[in-house]
Amino acid sequence: MDLSVQRITFDGLASAVRFQDPRSFVPFLADSATWLAAATVALVASAETLLCAAAVDGMHEGARSRYDRELAAQGIGNAVCGALGVLPVTGAVVRSAANIRAGARTRWATVFHGVWLLLFALLAPGALRLIPTAALASILVLNGIKLVDARAICALWKVSRGETGICLLTAIAVASVDLLTGVLVGIALSTLKLIHTFSKLRIRRRGDPATGRVTFVLEGSATFLRLPKLATALETVPVGSTVYFDIKGLSYIDHACMSLLSNWEKQHGAGGGKLVIDWETLKARFDTARPRPRPSARP
């Protein structure tokens, strides 16, 4: 019908590969923007590959992914891609999902997938140029829709609305901007949620007017982010009273909060008060985040 249809532009594999002169790398290596771009690609591509590997593992009951090997292969592949002047590689869940739906059982399925693509690029570049861009895009969109598990999203919503929000915002960023931006948004939001989760501290106060005893129950993690909250609670303690700290529900305390309690004990004691706390247990909570030394090998 001689319609103005945009099709895939491909002039052959030889035109896509551009061997780089080793001397051309010198000015690029001296540019900080090169290292920033490399770090971004490494971070995003690694995160995407690990997420895809984890997702694929949930689609079948065969051999599990070896994550260290996946990342090592990706690093070697991207080094070769950089030398050839082509786009970097990363894991993709769409092709893996298509292989699994087609009955794939081993990793040879993805190897042959690459072989078929290479043969088409070498032997039939003219056939590739007949494919409309819109048709290729529709196949990708359809596969993406098939990968959306509505039941899993509903189950995640019941477990954690925060995680569901992160997933939705990541998906919106991927669809509205691009994949790299979407993955970075997801990593940033997950990091913020992780910081919030591991710095959540609940302080409950119980007082005994008859004896003047005050009890604080600490639950969660006492980090520097919750230092103002802990200091505010201590300021409400009457001068000269006996203060008990129940730390059975405390999972971790950092150096800043440890120092606050230690200094406050001295100040409160100078006014005739008393602080009762299990310092040994508290120190154990502090040591939980410190690396344990490896035992030396005996001869």
Image: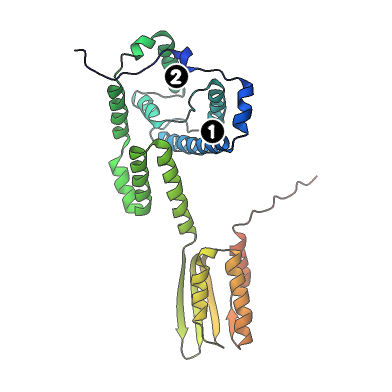
Q: Position of residue 160 (x, y in %)?
A: 36, 53
Secondary structure of residue under mark 1: helix
For this view, does 111 lie left or right of residue 167? Answer: right
Residue found at the very far right of the displayed protein: 299
Label 2 residue SS = helix
Residue drawn where x is 45% and y is 48% of the image: 188
Residue 218, horizontal then vertical, whole percent? 50, 70
Say the numbered circle drawn on residue 71.
1
> How many numbered markers are drawn?
2
Q: Which residue is drawn at 40% across and 31% down?
A: 93
Residue 6: image quadrant is top left
- Spot occupied by residue 23 in the image (x, y as percentages of width and height): 64, 23
Can the viewer see residue 263 in this picture? yes
**Which residue is label 2 attached to?**
114
Residue ID at (59%, 72%)? 260
Q: Given the image, on which type of amino acid does mark 2 rest?
A: Gly
